[in-house]
Each structure stands twice: as structure tokens, then as C-alpha cells.
Image (tube, rainbow, N blue to C red):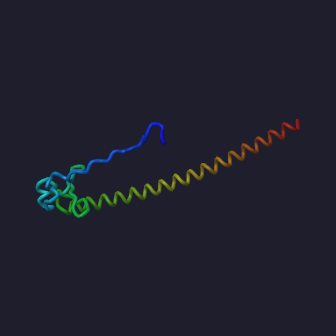
């Protein structure tokens, strides 16, 4: 028998009222879109003066230029991108080689310092 009575006695929750007072759940999808304004259209954005729209899972250029100009520009940009990637790979390779050379030189200098310290200690013992 507890000293102060039953300390944990949760009250029963009252029954819920109806799930929704709105009748929108009974409407079909097209009516709901009209009522709630869910017809947004295709997403569009403007990047660097070029309009893009999202269709079928991809961003497509929506500009007034002819397709030939866009294609040539895209090919030029792809070539430039390829050149920059190759240059980047070459620079990464050079950095890796320089780091290897630095670590080799550092290891050699540490060995030389160690040998020098040993020679100094041997010469001090002889004196």
C-alpha cells in the first residue's frame, strides 16, 4: 500500500471528433487542384540570362536563340570543360609527385641529421 496513494493514474482521453470538418477529402483530384490552386505549371528559372524549364525530369533551355547557336555554345563549353579537367588531372599528378619528392627529401635529411648526431657523440667520446 503506497504511502501517498497511487501517483500515476492517467485520465482517459475523450473520444475524437470527426477526422475533418472539411468536405475537401470527398472531392476528386481535379476539383481539389482547382479549389486549392495546386496547378503550378512547369518550374522555370533564370541562370546567367538563360531561361530554363523543368520538363520530364530534366532542365531544358527555353531561350529565343536558334538551336544551332545553343548547340555550338554547348560544344564549346564541353571542349573547354574537357581541357580544364585534363589540366586539373595533370596538376594533381604534379602535386602528388612533388609531395613524394618532399617526403623523400625530408626522410633523407632526417637520416643525415641522425648520422651527424651519432658522429658528434662518437667524436665527443674520443676526446
The residue furthest front is: 1
Q: Residue furthest right?
A: 126
Task: Classify residue 27 as left or right of residue 7.
Answer: left
The part of the image, by quadrant, that contains residue 31 is: bottom left
Q: Quadrant of the C terminus?
A: top right
Task: Give the residue at x 29% y 62%.
Answer: 75
Say if 2 sits above or below 67 in the image.
above
Point 20% across, 53% down: residue: 18
Q: Which residue is at a point 13% across and 60% down the rendered structure image?
A: 27
- Spot occupied by residue 44 in the image (x, y as percentages of width and height): 20, 54
- Between 95 and 50, the one nearer to me in the picture: 50
Q: Is residue 39 left or right of residue 80?
A: left
In-front residue for pair 11/93? 11
Is 122 placed above or below 30 here? Answer: above
- Residue 120 lies left or right of residue 60; in this view the side is right
Number of marks in picture? 0
In the rendered image, residue 9, in percent from the top left (x then y), is placed at 39, 44
Question: Is 123 placed above or below 89 here?
Answer: above
Question: Which x, y percent locates residue 77?
Answer: 31, 58
| Image coordinates for residue 69, horizontal then vertical, percent | 21, 60
Q: Residue at x 64, y 51 (%)?
A: 104
Quarter of the image for residue 67 reads bottom left
Amino acid at each position: 500500500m503506497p504511502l501517498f496513494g497511487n501517483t500515476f493514474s492517467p485520465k482517459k482521453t475523450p473520444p475524437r471528433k470527426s477526422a475533418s470538418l472539411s468536405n475537401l477529402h470527398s472531392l476528386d483530384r481535379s476539383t481539389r487542384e482547382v479549389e486549392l490552386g495546386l496547378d503550378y505549371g512547369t518550374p522555370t528559372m533564370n541562370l546567367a540570362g538563360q531561361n530554363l524549364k523543368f520538363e520530364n525530369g530534366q532542365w531544358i533551355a527555353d531561350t529565343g536563340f536558334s538551336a544551332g547557336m545553343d548547340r555550338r555554345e554547348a560544344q564549346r563549353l564541353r571542349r573547354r570543360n574537357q581541357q580544364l579537367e585534363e589540366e586539373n588531372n595533370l596538376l594533381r599528378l604534379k602535386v602528388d609527385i612533388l609531395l613524394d619528392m618532399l617526403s623523400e627529401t625530408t626522410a633523407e635529411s632526417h637520416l643525415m641529421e641522425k648520422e651527424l648526431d651519432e658522429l658528434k657523440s662518437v667524436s665527443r667520446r674520443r676526446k
